[in-house]
């Protein structure tokens, strides 16, 4: 359990709250097929992750064609969202319980603001978050802790009362840099083995396991 009352939980999005990896990989391959006539593996696409989509697409199509590629990417992402992506079962209930207990909730994702907005809208998740920081909102992307520090400053929460929840090594490193604790979740982590080699404060194998901890911590805050 936390060393003090739980003030804030900062969530990653992809692979943590939403099952969006297939959508992301297919959206990128949509662009790769248009511009290169190829189809890349998940590992090849994962290697582009870090900056938001515009930066990753520049690697594929060149900087001068990013805007047109981004329009195609976003059109595919929205059109296929319901088919290829979903919220992990039980996660909306966890977010509701945390928020109802007075815990501040934030989202810190490497996604760009456009795809983040689409996912929040389609999945009905926007109402839960007091602050959203995307890859377009920071100068230094994960594994930098810049986004976490921005969230803590704007929400007025302490390092001791804040947890980061994410599925990737970048989430661990960002949390460490920002001086907060990290709960690594492994229910859909594409970097599971690398995550397990890092030092973590808490590790959860399932949404149910995470929910039991989070709700108990929230109720303790409200008692």
Image (cartoon, rainbow, N blue to C red):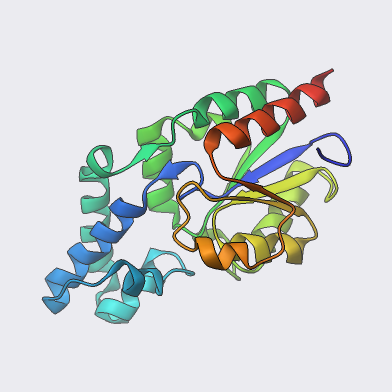
Tell me: 175 left or right of 89.
Answer: right
Above or below, comparing residue 221 to residue 50 in the picture: above
Which one is nearer the viewer's eye here, 6 or 145?
Answer: 6
**Residue 22 at what x, y percent from top left?**
30, 53
Toward which corner of the image does residue 60 lie, by quadrant?
Answer: bottom left
Which residue shows up at 84% across the image and 47% down it? 158
Tell me: 99 left or right of 217.
Answer: left
**Residue 14 at what x, y percent from top left?**
45, 50
Tell me: 67 left or right of 37.
Answer: right
Which one is nearer the viewer's eye here, 214 or 66?
Answer: 214
**Residue 176 at what x, y percent from top left?**
74, 63
Which residue shows up at 65% across the image and 29% down it? 212
Number of marks drawn: 0
Image quadrant for the C terminus?
A: top right
Above or below, comparing residue 190 to residue 162 in the picture: below
**Residue 19 at what x, y percent from top left?**
39, 44
Which residue shows up at 33% across the image and 74% down it? 44
- Which residue lies most toward the top here? 223
Tell me: 42 left or right of 38.
Answer: right
Which residue shows up at 68% across the image and 26% down it? 215
Image quadrant for the N terminus?
A: top right
Above or below, comparing residue 179 to residue 208 in the picture: below
Which one is nearer the viewer's eye here, 199 or 66?
Answer: 199
């Amino acid at each position: 359990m936390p060393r003090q009352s739980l003030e804030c939980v900062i969530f990653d999005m992809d692979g943590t709250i939403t099952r969006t990896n297939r959508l992301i990989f297919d959206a990128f391959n949509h662009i790769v097929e248009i511009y290169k006539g190829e189809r890349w593996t998940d590992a090849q696409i994962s290697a582009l992750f870090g900056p938001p989509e515009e930066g990753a697409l520049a690697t594929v199509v060149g900087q001068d064609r990013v805007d047109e590629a981004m329009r195609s990417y976003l059109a595919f992402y929205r059109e296929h969202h319901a088919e290829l992506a979903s919220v992990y079962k039980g996660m909306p209930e966890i977010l509701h319980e945390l928020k109802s207990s007075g815990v501040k909730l934030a989202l810190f994702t490497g996604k760009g603001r456009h795809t983040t907005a689409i996912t929040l809208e389609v999945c009905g998740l926007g109402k839960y978050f007091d602050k959203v920081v995307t890859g377009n909102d920071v100068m230094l992307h994960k594994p930098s802790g810049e986004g976490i520090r921005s969230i803590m400053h704007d929400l007025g929460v302490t390092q001791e009362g804040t947890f980061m929840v994410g599925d990737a090594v970048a989430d661990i490193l960002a949390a460490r840099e920002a001086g907060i604790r990290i709960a690594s979740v492994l229910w859909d982590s594409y970097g599971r083995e690398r995550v397990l080699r890092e030092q973590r404060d808490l590790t959860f194998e399932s949404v149910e396991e995470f929910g039991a901890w989070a709700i108990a911590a929230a109720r303790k805050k409200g008692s």
